[in-house]
Image (spheres, rainbow, N blue to C red):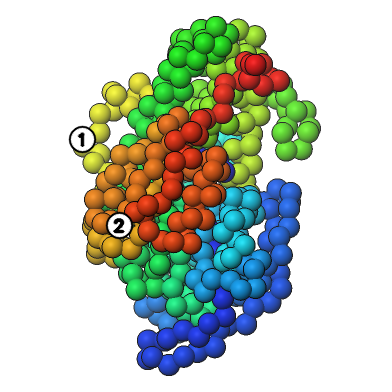
């Protein structure tokens, strides 16, 4: 769908303790059964313990349709483990916690030694009554709003056969997390949220502060933010930051000159006509012919500036496309985006969240469409979301959902200075009411800092001693984004 570019990748715990119910009586933890967590591309399988927790789809109709929440616990390595687990909350919205963890487990290895990791596939994602609809290439990259609208109506009709689409908002999801905490018998939990997952973490903290021990917000969405409203300009700023870094880098500048000029020439070329590309499909290896358009180009640029690994390739790929007329790398990336939306990404849940919590806040009359048109994403993102939401149901949003969050719980906020989605200003906005917080910004890094150098040690220290005062984050000051590739073989000497 035109309304969302996938994660570069964006949720989890259990120590068998008795918990207090609302009545004050202790209950035994729910039984867990052995299971496996499988990587989305089948690259790994991790042992875990799982539980299917049944809840009412519509809490206002407890006798109505019931849905199953998939809960996975990765038990701590140390038998003498800490009593408070880590719940990992994935991004998107639309990514499953279990899938996210299989892709990022190594980053949590230090924490996992002493703490259980708990993964709750948020309602509507993964194995929790998923709301998936595959998108075609035309629906992802087409210019015609009527195609998008037809896809939305087709997806809605298919999903409504077995779901009330309004019942998949963040306000309901945090109630599910609390049910999981109670079912597993934890008194307190730690939270790690990335991207959209930071929204879930903050709202859980708002609702259940007494059960929240410590929180890490990575790529922060502040409560007041309407995601998507500033996306095009934020992505453009990140792209220009990458170009400026290349110009300042002696080897990159000598090899590629000013990448901004190369980008401008390519954008003008693709605006005039599509480029035919023959390549091997990156998923199947089968021969493939495609017409690479300006819309493909915009989608791939946004994906590349998400992370330093993508930004490191950007000047080289732009140079190859303009000078060598070689668009195969760009075309391959666009096919990978298509695969994401043809797979397990929960488009339906994504639409319900965005249409209920974000698009209604868009200042449509005040948007400078001329300025947006100058960005590589243009007005397509915001127009696409408005089109989608014109045909999608909205669900319950708590009255205080977008109010400033005020809390004394220890919170560590992480940002990349070149984040194309949640720039550091977002974290600063969220931090105003977080009286026991620290904001760490990594220069030149993009969206989500979980895999950044030494970040695993920082998170381990923070969860072991949940306090921002005296937290040693000195190693992050030495972190540098991946150097620019000068050839396909890698950076220079």
- Circles 2, 1 touching at the beta carbon (< 8 Å): no
Looking at the picture, does residue 359 appear above or below residue 175? above
- Of 414 and 53, the residue lying toward us: 414
Between disc 2 and disc 1, the foreground one is 2
Question: Which residue is at a point 43% across and 93% down the rendered structure image?
Answer: 25
Question: Which residue is at a point 54% across and 88% down the rendered structure image?
Answer: 28
Q: Residue 105: x and y, percent?
A: 63, 53
- Determine which residue is flagged by label 2: 436
Pick whichever of labels 2 and 1 is earlier in the sequence: 1
Question: Which residue is at a point 51% across and 59% down the rendered structure image?
Answer: 88
User: Of helix, strand and loop, which one carries label 2?
Assistant: loop
- Of 205 and 69, the residue lying toward us: 205
- Determine which residue is flagged by label 1: 366
- Of 83 and 275, the residue lying toward us: 83
Is residue 286 at all visible to an observer of this figure? yes
Q: CA distance from mark 2 to mark 1?
A: 35 Å
- Of 355 and 83, the residue lying toward us: 83
User: Of helix, strand and loop, which one carries label 1?
Assistant: helix
Q: Would you call the spot at circle 2 few (<14 residues within 10 Å), some (14-19), or many (20 or more)?
A: some
Q: Residue 166: x and y, percent?
A: 40, 64
Q: Residue furthest left?
A: 366
């Amino acid at each position: 769908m035109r309304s969302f570019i996938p994660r570069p990748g964006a949720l989890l715990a259990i120590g068998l303790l008795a918990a207090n119910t609302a009545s004050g009586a202790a209950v035994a933890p729910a039984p867990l059964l052995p299971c496996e967590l499988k990587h989305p591309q089948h690259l790994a399988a991790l042992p875990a313990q799982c539980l299917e927790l049944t809840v009412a789809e519509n809490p206002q109709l407890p006798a109505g349709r019931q849905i199953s929440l998939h809960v996975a616990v990765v038990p701590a390595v140390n038998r003498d483990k800490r009593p408070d687990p880590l719940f990992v909350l994935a991004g998107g919205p639309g990514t499953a916690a279990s899938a996210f963890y299989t892709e990022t487990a190594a980053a949590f290895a230090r924490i996992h030694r002493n703490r259980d990791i708990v993964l709750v596939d948020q309602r509507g994602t993964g194995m929790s009554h998923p709301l998936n609809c595959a998108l075609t290439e035309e629906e992802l990259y087409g210019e015609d709003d009527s195609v998008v609208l037809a896809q939305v109506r087709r997806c809605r009709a298919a999903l409504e056969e077995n779901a009330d689409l309004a019942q998949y908002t963040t306000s309901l999801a945090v109630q599910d997390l609390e049910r999981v905490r109670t079912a597993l018998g934890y008194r307190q939990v730690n939270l790690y949220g990335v991207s959209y997952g930071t929204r879930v973490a903050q709202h859980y903290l708002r609702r259940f502060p007494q059960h929240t021990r410590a929180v890490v917000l990575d790529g922060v969405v502040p409560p007041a933010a309407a995601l998507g409203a500033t996306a095009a300009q934020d992505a453009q700023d990140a792209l220009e930051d990458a170009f400026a870094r290349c110009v300042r880098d002696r080897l990159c500048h000598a090899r590629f000159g000013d990448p901004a000029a190369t980008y401008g020439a390519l954008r003008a070329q693709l605006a005039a006509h599509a480029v035919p590309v023959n390549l091997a499909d990156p998923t199947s290896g089968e021969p493939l012919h495609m017409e690479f358009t300006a819309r493909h180009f915009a989608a791939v640029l946004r994906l590349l500036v998400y992370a330093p690994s993508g930004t490191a390739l950007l000047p080289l790929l732009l140079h190859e496309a303009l000078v060598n007329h070689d668009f195969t790398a760009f075309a391959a990336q666009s096919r990978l985006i298509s695969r994401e939306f043809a797979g397990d990404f929960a488009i339906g849940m994504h639409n319900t969240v965005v249409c209920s919590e974000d698009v209604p806040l868009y200042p449509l009359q005040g948007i400078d469409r001329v300025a947006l048109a100058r960005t590589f994403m243009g007005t397509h993102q915001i127009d696409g979301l408005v089109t989608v939401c014109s045909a999608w149901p909205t669900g319950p949003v708590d009255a205080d959902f977008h109010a400033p969050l005020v809390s004394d719980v220890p919170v560590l906020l992480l940002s990349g200075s070149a984040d194309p989605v949640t720039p550091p200003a977002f974290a600063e906005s969220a931090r105003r009411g977080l009286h026991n917080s620290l904001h760490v910004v990594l220069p030149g890094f993009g969206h989500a800092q979980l895999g950044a150098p030494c970040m695993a040690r920082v998170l381990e220290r923070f969860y072991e001693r949940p306090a921002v005062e005296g937290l040693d984050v000195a190693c992050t000051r030495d972190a540098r984004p991946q150097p620019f590739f000068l050839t396909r073989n890698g950076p220079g000497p």
